[in-house]
């Protein structure tokens, strides 16, 4: 028998996400999760509140968390995946340092919000709901953010960017990349200055 969508998604995300979270983070998360789960009854009705609590704490739901939740509630892991992936309130990738959300509400949609999303996807090399490997950017879509007069709209680190255009997508990503390079140069310089002071 073929695998269900949830099974396929579960396996695929498990592989990707295992690479994304560092070993140390995962060890700390494992101990934390035990504590978090101990606050919830071992009943399947606790599944959604548990998933919400995990997302509130970590910003996403790691595959290891899915396994622990399944153990705690006596469910199959695939059942937990199935429920979690059904609701679009849950994320399955760690949040990036910069969070980009493209509005796909009606006003933004008719003014090309989906094209703006595609441009971000292409520029960042990730799909909606994912995070870049360096954890610099995560990309999501949102429903109306209440600024329809500025459609199409993107929210970048909580800042509203209105009248979005493909060229603005380039500018936003480039701006962050330049800022990152500048910080790296300054850090490098501070390190060199520190070394020369200690050796003099
Ligand atoms: S639909 Fe995008 S801000 Fe309202």
Image (cartoon, rainbow, N blue to C red):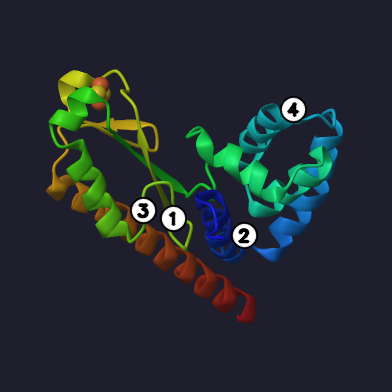
Give the mark, 2 or 4, whose residue is nearer the N terminus. 2
Q: Residue at x 33, y 53 (%)?
A: 176
Q: Compared to 85, does 9 lie above or below? A: below
Closer to the observer: label 1 or label 2? 2
Q: Position of residue 33 (x, y in %)?
A: 78, 44
Q: Position of residue 190 (x, y in %)?
A: 50, 66
Q: For marks 1 and 2, give the CA distance.
A: 14 Å
Q: Residues within 10 Å of mark 1 (few under 14, many from 20)?
A: some
Q: Position of residue 78 (x, y in %)?
A: 65, 49
Give the mark, 4 or 1, whose residue is nearer the N terminus. 4
Q: For marks 3 and 4, give the CA distance.
A: 30 Å
Task: Give the numbered dot on residue 136.
Answer: 1
Question: Is 183 displayed left or right of 13 in the figure?
Answer: left
Instruction: Find disc 2 in the rendering and name its residue.
Output: 21
Question: Is 51 displayed left or right of 183 in the figure?
Answer: right
Instruction: Find disc 4 in the rendering and name its residue.
Output: 46
Residue 191, quarter of the rendered image: bottom right
Q: Residue furthest bottom?
A: 199
Closer to the observer: label 2 or label 4? 4
Instruction: Find disc 3 in the rendering and name its residue.
Output: 127
Q: Nearer the viewer, residue 170 or 9?
A: 9
Q: Secondary structure at mark 3?
A: loop
Closer to the observer: label 3 or label 4? 4
């Amino acid at each position: 028998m073929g695998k269900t969508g949830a099974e396929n998604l579960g396996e695929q995300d498990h592989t990707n996400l295992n690479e994304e979270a560092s070993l140390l983070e995962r060890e700390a998360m494992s101990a934390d999760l035990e504590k978090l789960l101990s606050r919830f009854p071992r009943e399947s009705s606790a599944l959604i509140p548990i998933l919400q609590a995990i997302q509130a704490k970590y910003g996403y739901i790691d595959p290891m968390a899915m396994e622990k939740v399944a153990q705690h509630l006596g469910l199959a892991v695939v059942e937990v995946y199935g429920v979690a992936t059904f609701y679009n309130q849950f994320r399955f990738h760690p949040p990036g340092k910069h969070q980009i959300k493209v509005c796909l509400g009606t006003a933004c949609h008719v003014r090309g919000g989906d094209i703006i999303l595609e441009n971000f996807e292409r520029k960042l090399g990730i799909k909606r709901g994912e995070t870049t490997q360096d954890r610099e950017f995560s990309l999501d879509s949102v429903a109306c953010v209440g600024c329809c007069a500025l459609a199409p709209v993107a929210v970048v680190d909580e800042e509203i960017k209105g009248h979005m255009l493909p060229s603005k997508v380039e500018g936003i990503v480039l701006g962050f990349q330049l800022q990152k390079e500048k910080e790296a140069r300054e850090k490098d310089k501070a390190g060199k200055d520190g070394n020369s002071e200690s050796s003099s």
